[in-house]
Amino acid sequence: MAELGLNEHHQNEVINYMRFARSKRGLRLKTVDSCFQDLKESRLVEETFTVDEVSEVLSGLQAVVHSEVESELINTAYTNVLLLRQLFSQAEKWYLKLQTDISELENRELLEQVAEFEKAEFTSSNKKPIIEIIKPKLVPLNEGGTTELLNKEISRLQEENEKLKSRLKTIETQATNALDEKSKLERALQDLQLDQGNQKDFIKAQDLSDLENTVATLKSEFQKTLDDKTENQKSLEENLATAKHDLLRVQEQLRMAEKELEKKFQQTAAYRNMKEILTKKNDQIKDLRKRLAKYEPED
């Protein structure tokens, strides 16, 4: 079977449109045939006609056929505009801009390919029963479809929000542990320095130089460890700030999505009907209060 280079769903949509176009084309051809048949039955009742009479008959037939063909061409153009409007409306719902190439409409190779496709689809031997294709009704573009997709997007954002919260909690825990370890190391250094001061009076002069060298080595190693911990803490703090920014961004997206959903809901027919009913009820309550006020005794 000839193919148009489309997926199965879109190809089925093309087949449905071609079926509709074939039906309209058949009706118009029958209308043109009836114009000729009416002319035969109403005007061709004599055996001979003058040149003027033949000219008048042909002129009348020309006007009728011209009107029918023009009407069909106009209707076909309007039908194609409505079809394009459906496609563009769906694209605009997701902020897409579609483009068309008008020159391709007169591409003979492509037109012949469409003709072969139609022939393969609608010949009596290959024609598929219509009952085999049972398609579900599409969700309305202006309400259900967008609302459903917005709900899915909100759910996705909520899941991402929870993941970011968990990640933020983990980073905060790591930062706290790093600060605790840094404090412990600083206290250990202070204790070491204090012990060094207390033991100076009891250490011999020859051992003092070795001890100072050992302390200097330990201090250098401790400073290196402390610098590593500080760098690690700085990295953790940067990750924490990034996670917080991501969390704020996701929360803002969630808030905007919820506002969009609320706005879409307010535009639905159910919301407008509910608002109209509430307005009528309020008017009825005001009217009843006015009536009751007339029967209340005056002081």
Image: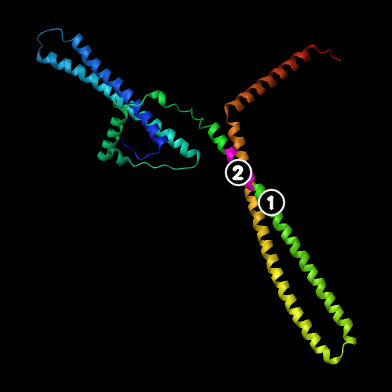
Q: Position of residue 18 (x, y in %)?
A: 34, 29
- Mark 2: which amino acid? Arg
Could you give the CA–CA distance between mark 2 and mark 1, rounded to whole angstroms?
16 Å
Q: Position of residue 42 (x, y in %)?
A: 20, 9
Judged left or right of residue 74, residue 158 is right
**Colouring chosen for the image of the structure:** rainbow
Foreground pick, 210 / 81: 210
Question: Does the magenta portion include 101?
Answer: no
Quadrant of the image for the C terminus?
top right
Q: Name the mark on residue 126.
A: none
Foreground pick, 4 / 41: 4
Q: Could you say which quadrant of the image residue 71 lies in?
A: top left
Residue placed under numbered mark 1 in the picture:
166
| Residue in view at x 54 percent, y 35 percent | 146
Residue placed under numbered mark 2 in the picture:
156
The answer to whether the residue labelled 2 contacts the one labelled 1, judged by CB atoms less than 8 Å apart, is: no
| Residue in view at x 82 percent, y 71 percent | 187
Q: Main secondary structure of the magenta part?
A: helix
- Mark 1: which amino acid? Ser
Q: Position of residue 48 (x, y in %)?
A: 9, 10
Q: Position of residue 258 (x, y in %)?
A: 62, 39
Q: Could you say which quadrant of the image residue 262 lies in?
A: top right
- Magenta span of residues: 150-160
